[in-house]
Image (cartoon, helix red, strand yellow):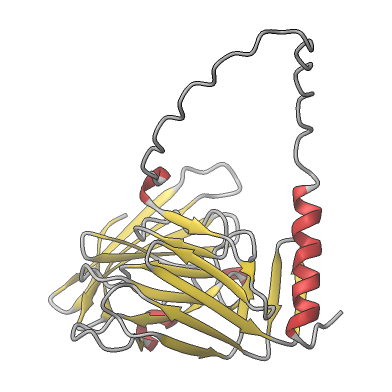
Amino acid sequence: MRIRSCAPLFLMLLALTACNEGNGAPQPPSSPEKPADAPAKAEPEAAPAAPATVSGGFESAKADFDANGQLQAAVGDVGIRITASECEPLMPTLVTCENGAEVHIDGPAGKPEQTFRLPSLYLNPQATVYRGKADGGYKKDGYSIIVSDLNGDGREDLAFWTGRQGAYGGPSFDIYLDAPDGKAFAPNRALSDLTVGHNGMFTVADGKIVATTKSGCCEHTSETYEIDHDKPKLVETVTERSASDGAPPTRTIERLIDGKMQKVQQ
């Protein structure tokens, strides 16, 4: 069933949320009431609220609807508002808006507000936004929007789940990098293309990108890229193959040497 306006999308996602929440574990029975003649006890003073902590060093948020039927989410000083139409459910916690979506970003501090007009958007209302290190934590729950340093320069960038061109129909992303002069986020096609044909988003550590691919059950490849002027440059591949006949697995390593990828170990 295709949804052709924000209001039906609002109702559909509310229904999905209610269905998911209804599958939770039953609540324990409430404690019995005190006898009517039990002496009243002085209530202890409320302790001051503890500062919020973020488990695992990241923040995440699910989307909520505002009065206009738009989806809103916030992680720290980053506010997000999503407007989409002609959307349809793809699975119990995923909606696809293939005819385009608008994502309005307010923040982080020092950045101008900006609206991104995307060709499509894969929307998970229960895991909408991830903000944290690009260490792969965003892969577990399938976040729609990622706020993270994606080119190793210490500044937060943006990634939007806009397609299923990853390996075996997995997610692919449109990536926008933070400009050093405080201007608007700018699209980066080279990094976006690195999510096509790979196992979803790459990871970033120590200024390098690691992307992975697989071929069937038995061949897995890890690719390491250096980032040169916001473009990935392949410097190493590690391919592991296991045989279905019980033969020992093999491991092949290639590195960039004198401008060419050369085999250094097998």
Residue nearest the viewer, comparing 164 with 158: 158
Expressed as whole percent of the image width and height from the top left, the position of residue 223 reads: 35, 66
Q: Is residue 213 visible?
A: no
Expressed as whole percent of the image width and height from the top left, the position of residue 166 reads: 55, 73
Q: Is residue 106 visible?
A: yes
Q: How many marks?
A: 0
221 sits left or right of 246 in the view: left
Q: Which residue lies at the image location 67% right of the left edge and 81% below the top edge?
A: 68
Expressed as whole percent of the image width and height from the top left, the position of residue 151 reads: 27, 73
Residue nearest the viewer, comparing 54 with 241: 54
Residue farthest right in this picture: 1
Location of the N terminus by quadrant is bottom right
Location of the C terminus by quadrant is bottom left
Residue nearest the viewer, comparing 133 with 82: 82
Q: Which residue lies at the image location 39% right of the left edge and 85% below the top edge?
A: 113
Q: Is residue 210 above or below residue 26?
A: below
230 sits left or right of 55 in the view: left
Residue farthest left in this picture: 258
Q: Which residue lies at the image location 44% right of the left edge and 75% below the top edge?
A: 159
Q: Is residue 71 above or below residue 14?
A: below
Q: Which residue lies at the image location 76% right of the left edge and 87% below the top edge?
A: 5
Q: Is residue 72 above or below residue 50?
A: below
Expressed as whole percent of the image width and height from the top left, the position of residue 258 reads: 12, 76
Quarter of the rendering containing residue 14: bottom right
Residue nearest the viewer, comparing 232 with 8: 8
Q: Is residue 164 above or below residue 93?
A: below
